[in-house]
């Protein structure tokens, strides 16, 4: 209501000028950032960040409007008022206090906070890297991304039924896959059947569940479906047949491996760690060799599930031609006129903690995941990141 009041007061003060055009959602207001308009509506610190952002990006990228969409309507309204006030009779002194009050009020809205906090040079905040026009510079910036551990503690603390409801595969996330549409179609048919039988409350429940499903899996980026790192790690544990175990009301995921295999793996990884140390800390990927698949034993050793998220550059020397072709396409996507559609890429590994840790804990974990991957004992997932959200891209193998 206060928004409308302020807007009406300002438009009425400009009634003798050219009529303020009715606001429509458009992107032209972003076309000329160097105009004085932005200096007037942004604080000095905000303007500096906007300037850094627009100085480093390709302003013709089709995703730009999407990035600013939450505040685009506000920007257009403010811009229309700014133009109208500046077209008043030049002889009349123009009091823009009300205009600035309007701008400050609008910028207190959460939608502005959500957008403004992401606007800065991609070189500074490592966000919006898909807008950087130079592929080499994008990849150089991505080198700053680090390895992350993925925690399943929240999911595992819930009722066991929550874990059972997690899919055992990634079929719903395949680009152009039919499973998503098929599920919604079946849900719609099931709800209609309940309605026809006079059980509308059951039909409503089915529709509610379908809506939840749609919200979870329906968001896409050029066909690539949203997925969280947590859900990726949970599904990976199922695709690799890891065990869901509850002891003393505490759930965990266990990975069963033979003692012989773990000893071989530990010895090989310790050897690689020594070679990396002798090489000045640089990993020579050519020395990494596949291991034989573990032989089953009657009393296997139980390891803790420890999923990890790696920046793609860590795994890039191990990437197959198929993986490289996929990334090349995403970096020059036809839907965006040959521009990148993701800010960065990550590799999610279904890792486990060794019972025989080496002396180089961080390095040994990384080398363990490399060896398990090239041995095809684990099959990681590649995800793309955009605006802090993750999207399923592909299996590693």
Image (cartoon, helix red, strand yellow):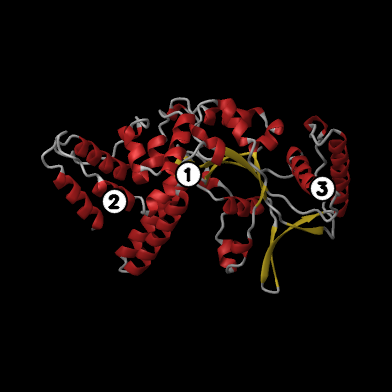
x, y percent for residue 373: 73, 41
Q: Alpha carbon of mark 2 to alpha carbon of mark 3: how far? A: 69 Å
Q: Which residue is mark 1?
A: 118
Q: Is residue 320 visible?
A: yes
User: Secondary structure under badge 2?
Assistant: helix
On residue 294, the disc is: 3
On residue 386, the disc is: none
Q: Name the residue located 59 percent from the left edge and 54 percent from the top edge.
A: 230
| Residue 397 relative to residue 185: left or right | right
Tell us which disc is closer to us: 1 or 2: 2
Residue sitting farthest toward the bottom: 248
x, y percent for residue 374: 75, 37
| Residue 155 relative to residue 274: left or right | left
Q: Which residue is mark 2?
A: 101
Question: Can you tell which quarter of the image residue 81 is in?
Answer: top left
Picture layout, residue 158 above or below residue 258:
below
Mark 1 vs 2, N-terminal side? 2
User: Secondary structure under badge 3?
Assistant: loop
Mark 1 vs 3, N-terminal side? 1
Q: Alpha carbon of mark 1 to alpha carbon of mark 2: how far? A: 24 Å
Q: Is residue 126 visible?
A: no
Quadrant in which the C terminus appears: top right
Tell us which disc is closer to us: 2 or 3: 2
Mark 2 vs 3, N-terminal side? 2
Q: Which is more toward the observer, 364 or 165?
A: 364
Tell us which disc is closer to us: 1 or 3: 1
User: Secondary structure under badge 1?
Assistant: loop
x, y percent for residue 285: 78, 32
Q: Which is more toward the observer, 374 or 53?
A: 53
């Amino acid at each position: 209501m206060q928004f409308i009041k302020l807007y009406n007061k300002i438009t009425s003060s400009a009634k003798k000028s050219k009529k303020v055009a009715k606001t429509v959602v458009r992107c032209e207001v972003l076309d000329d950032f160097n105009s004085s308009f932005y200096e007037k509506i942004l604080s000095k610190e905000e303007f500096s960040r906007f300037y850094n952002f627009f100085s480093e990006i390709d302003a013709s990228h089709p995703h730009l409007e999407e990035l600013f969409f939450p505040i685009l309507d506000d920007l257009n309204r403010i811009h229309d008022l700014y133009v109208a006030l500046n077209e008043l009779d030049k002889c009349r002194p123009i009091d823009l206090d009300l205009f600035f009050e309007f701008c400050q009020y609008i910028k207190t809205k959460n939608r502005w906070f959500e957008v403004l906090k992401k606007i800065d040079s991609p070189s500074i905040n490592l966000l919006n890297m898909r807008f950087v026009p130079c592929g080499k510079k994008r990849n150089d910036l991505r080198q700053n991304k680090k390895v992350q551990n993925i925690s399943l503690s929240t999911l595992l603390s819930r009722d066991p039924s929550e874990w059972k409801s997690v899919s055992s595969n990634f079929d719903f996330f395949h680009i152009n896959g039919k499973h998503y549409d098929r599920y919604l179609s079946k849900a719609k048919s099931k709800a209609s059947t309940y309605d026809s039988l006079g059980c509308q409350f059951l039909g409503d429940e089915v529709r509610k569940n379908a809506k939840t499903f749609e919200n979870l899996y329906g968001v896409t980026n050029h066909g690539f479906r949203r997925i969280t790192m947590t859900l990726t790690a949970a599904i990976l544990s199922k695709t690799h047949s890891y065990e869901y175990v509850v002891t003393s009301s505490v759930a965990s995921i266990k990975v069963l491996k033979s003692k012989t295999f773990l000893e071989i793996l530990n010895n090989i990884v310790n050897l690689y760690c020594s070679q990396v140390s002798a090489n000045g800390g640089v990993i020579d990927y050519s020395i990494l060799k596949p291991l034989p698949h573990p032989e089953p034993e009657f009393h296997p050793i139980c390891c803790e599930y420890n999923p990890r998220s790696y920046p793609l550059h860590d795994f890039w020397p191990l990437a197959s031609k198929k993986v490289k072709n996929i990334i090349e396409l995403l970096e020059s996507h036809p839907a965006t006129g040959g521009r990148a559609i993701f800010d960065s890429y990550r590799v999610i590994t279904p890792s486990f903690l060794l019972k025989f840790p080496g002396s180089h804990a961080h390095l040994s974990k990384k080398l363990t995941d490399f060896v398990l991957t090239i041995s095809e004992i684990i099959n990681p997932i590649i995800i793309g990141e955009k605006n802090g959200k993750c999207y399923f891209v592909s299996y590693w193998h």
